[in-house]
Structure formats: C-alpha cells, structure tokens
C-alpha cells in the first residue's frame, strides 16, 4: 500500500473526516491511529455526482415516504441467497419490522375499499403481511417468489403482491412464463440452437429499436409453429447457421399449415440475420402461397334452436350469446367490455367506439346478469361487465379459459355466432360491403368475404 510520510491515504481521509469541513489548519495525521481505523472506504458514502439526501416533504403514509423508510441508504447484503421457507412461520410470530407491517396493513385496508374485498379476504391478506414481516429484517427486500409461497397457507398471494406493488421493497423475481414454456417444450434442442432461439424469443418478447414487443400469446404461437422444424433439424445440426434454403423448402412442402409456419420461420431467421447470428437468411425468397380463404356459413335451424336452449339455462351464457350473436362482438371484446360502455337507460352499446343501439333481448340479458352480479359480489369494483370469483376483487377481465368453458354447452363456437349475424346483416342490406365495414368495424377484405358469400348463396338459390 502506498504511503506518504508514513501515513496511508485511508488514514489521511479518516483524519480529515475527524477534523471536519471547517478545519483550516494542518490535520493531525496521528488521530486515526488513536481513535481507530475506519471499516469503510472513505469518500464512497454517496454515488459520484450525486447530491446529499434532503428532507422528504410527502404526505404521511405515502409510498414515497415509505420508499425511503423501508429501503435505507445502506444495508448489509446477504452472503448467500437462499429460498425462504414459510412452512414454519405463522402470523403470531414476533415481527422483525413492525413499522412496515403497520403501514402495509393500513395500505391493504385502503386497497380493500377500492377493490371491494370481503372482510375474510382482507384478514387473510393482513395475515400474509405479518408472516412476511416476521421473516424479513428492516430494509430487507421481499421477493415475489416468497410471497407466492403464501398460496400454500390459503392466503391469496396475488392480493398480497398487490399491496407490495410500487414499493421499492419488492423484488419481482418471478420467471417469465415464456421462458418456462421454452424450458419445458424445447429441452431437446442442441445448445447452439437453443441459444439462437432464446435470442429470437428475447427480441419478440422485449422488442428493440425496430421491433415492438409482442404479446405472450403471439410468442407462444410462433414457437409452436417453428417447434416441429427445430425438432427435425436438431437431429442433424448443432446451429441454425447450417440450415439451407433446400432444408426449409423441403420441410414446408409437406406441411399442412405451411403458410403460418413459413411466416414464423421468416421471423426467426430474419431476426437472427439482423442480429448477425446467422450468415444468410434461408427464408429469403421462399414463398408458401396464400392462406386458404374460409367461406362464412350461416347457422342451421337446429343449431339456432340448440343455442337458444342453452342460453335459457344460464343467464351468464345468455349475455355472451347476445353480445356475439346479435352485436357480432369478438370474444376479446366480450371479455374486456366495461360496464361504462353499456348504457341501459339510453339503450346504447359502445365497445371500442361502435355506439350500437341496444336491443330488448340484449338489454334484458344484461340487466338480469347485473342483478345476479350485484347479489353475488355486492362490493366488487371491477370495471368489466363480466366477472368471476377470481376477478371480482381485482380490476382484471375474465380469462379466455373461463370463456371457453362457459360456451362449451353451445353446439358452435362464438365466432360462428358472429359470422351468422354478419351474414344476416349482409343479406338484409343488399350485400353492401361499406355498410358491413361501418356497422361491424370490418376491414375491406373481410367485408367482401361476407358479401361474396351472400351473393354465392343467392346465386345457388336462383339456380335451383
């Protein structure tokens, strides 16, 4: 260690710290030896270029105030990261951070008022907060994976996680579901191919300067389309740089779904080429044709009778059937329809700016459903029209799995109900594509597809 006049740099800085900023005389360099040496590197107590922390003028109990309180300026990081085990901890265990527990319990009460949590749910959430504050020291971060363990103790971990949301004390270490899907379904890939696929998935999931992030469902669909090709190539190749154009064209020639699979492969190799992970794009110039155009077919009388019978048995299903079969709403619009977009008094329905008139059947179905919803979940503040037991205490829409299970009694899918309604409108208005595009928010090609189907059906009837 370099020294000057028998004193090292650290002792000089320690002596200057003891003398203070107002000292204008020679510093006593022996004071560090008399008073003890520092256990930190002097001059590193504040980030370079940073300002000393000033007084925080915030409302009492606000998250900004607690970000400073629960995350102190200095903390001792653990030597080894180990997973927490909550099996031996109860809500009666002495709290290591009672002040944080009090703040979080009060915050849970405010969220319960906004979300309409029943008292039992609020009590379970507060019990989970006390369990977490009993195993975490003051200032110690709380991991989302630790909160997820509360599910095994009959505590709603999602609600507890919502209480911790937006606080610096929370560390969201939950794995991405797409990565879990890849680990489960792509374990057969060679290491080189897996690394290249992971780079493609990362750009699809997170985006970059030229690509916007894709939804999880889109990424999973793309992976499912390229998975058969990867399984076949991994037996012969160790990297996708070895794939040739002949490999791609030969494989696509025998595929029944080659249009969609060619699009997914084009995305894969296009990203790898731009990232300079492959030398050439084997999909360059490869065409797979156009996807086959399906012709919408109206429902038969037997199917209409079966749909009506199933709708009479379930008022929730009746609401969904009315929205799909009368207003031609897609399943996504049905799931995300807000209560504020339904004007029962004014008899208007306004999903995504449609501003449709509300017929008597749909108005009656929605009124009956709202009465049932208020009776079962009177305190729910979920803004969506359709809710379930799991979404009643949140602001999330119902899931696709719930909607698929709801329509299982129907003989046809919701999209068939929607197509039948559009075909009916096309037949009643003289197959005008502009009218269909305006009423149902269709594109030009979709409108022509319905009008051509009506025209073909009329031609067949005239020939008979």
Image (cartoon, rainbow, N blue to C red):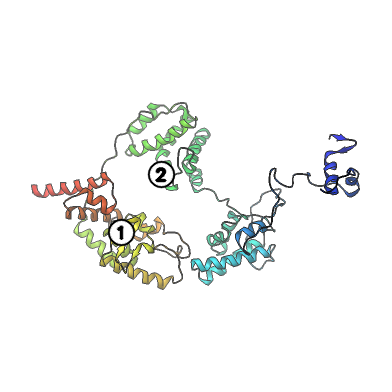
Residue 310 percent across, percent down from the top left:
28, 64
Q: Is 10 positioned to the left or the right of 134 in the image?
A: right
Q: Determine crowd level at label 1: few under 14, some 14-19, many 20+ residues with C-alpha closer than 10 A.
A: some
Tell me which corner region of the image, top left, top right, bottom left or bottom right, holds residue 397.
Answer: bottom left
Question: Between 87 and 363, which is closer to the camera in this rendering?
Answer: 363
Residue 65 percent across, percent down from the top left:
64, 59
Residue 314 visible in the snapshot: no
The answer to whether 12 is drawn above or below residue 367 in the figure is above
Q: Which residue is mark 2?
A: 221
* Mark sitting on residue 337: none
Q: Nearer the observer, disc 1 or disc 2? A: 1
Does dot 2 land on a helix, a strand or a loop?
A: helix
Which badge, 1 or 2, is on the more N-terminal residue?
Answer: 2
Contact? badges 1 and 2 (CB < 8 Å) = no
Tell me which corner region of the image, top left, top right, bottom left or bottom right, holds residue 374.
Answer: bottom left
Mark 1 to mark 2: distance in Å? 33 Å
Q: Which residue is mark 1?
A: 355
Residue 114 percent across, percent down from the top left:
50, 66
């Amino acid at each position: 260690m370099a020294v000057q006049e028998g004193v090292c740099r650290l002792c000089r800085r320690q002596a200057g710290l003891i003398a203070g900023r107002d000292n204008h005389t020679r510093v006593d360099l022996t004071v560090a030896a008399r008073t003890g040496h520092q256990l930190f590197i002097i001059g590193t107590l504040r980030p370079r270029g940073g300002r000393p922390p000033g007084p925080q003028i915030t409302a009492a109990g606000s998250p900004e105030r607690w970000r400073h309180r629960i995350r102190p300026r200095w903390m001792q990081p653990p030597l080894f990261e180990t997973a927490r085990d909550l099996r031996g901890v109860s809500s009666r265990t002495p709290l290591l951070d009672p002040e944080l527990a009090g703040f979080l319990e009060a915050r849970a009460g405010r969220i319960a008022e906004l979300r309409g949590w029943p008292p039992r749910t609020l009590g379970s959430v507060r019990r989970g907060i006390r369990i977490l504050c009993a195993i975490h020291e003051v200032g110690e971060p709380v991991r989302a994976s630790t909160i997820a363990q509360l599910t095994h103790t009959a505590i709603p971990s999602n609600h507890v996680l919502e209480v911790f949301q937006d606080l610096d004390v929370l560390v969201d270490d939950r794995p991405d579901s797409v990565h879990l899907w890849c680990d489960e379904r792509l374990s057969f890939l060679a290491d080189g191919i897996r690394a290249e696929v992971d780079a493609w998935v990362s750009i699809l999931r997170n985006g970059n300067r030229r690509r916007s992030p894709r939804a999880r469902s889109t990424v999973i669909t793309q992976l499912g389309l390229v998975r058969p090709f990867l399984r076949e190539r991994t037996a012969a190749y160790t990297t996708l740089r070895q794939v040739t154009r002949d490999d791609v064209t030969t494989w696509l020639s025998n595929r029944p779904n080659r249009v969609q699979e060619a699009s997914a492969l084009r995305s894969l190799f296009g990203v790898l080429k731009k990232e300079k992970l492959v030398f050439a794009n084997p999909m360059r110039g490869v065409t797979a044709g156009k996807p086959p155009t399906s012709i919408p077919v109206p429902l038969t009388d037997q199917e209409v009778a079966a749909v009506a019978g199933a709708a009479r048995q379930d008022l929730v299903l009746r609401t969904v059937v009315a929205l799909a079969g009368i207003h031609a709403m897609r399943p996504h619009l049905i799931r995300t329809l807000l209560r504020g977009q339904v004007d029962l008094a004014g008899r208007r329905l306004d999903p995504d700016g449609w501003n449709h008139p509300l017929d008597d059947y749909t108005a009656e179905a929605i009124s009956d459903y709202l009465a049932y919803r208020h009776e079962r979940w009177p305190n729910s503040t979920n803004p969506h029209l359709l809710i379930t037991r799991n979404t009643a205490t949140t602001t999330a829409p119902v899931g696709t799995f719930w909607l698929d299970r709801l329509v299982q009694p129907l003989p046809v899918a919701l999209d068939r109900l929607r197509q039948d309604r559009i075909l009916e409108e096309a037949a009643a208005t003289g197959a005008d594509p502009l009218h269909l595009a305006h009423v149902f928010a269709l594109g030009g090609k979709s409108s022509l597809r319905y009008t051509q189907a009506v025209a073909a059906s009329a031609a067949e009837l005239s020939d008979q």
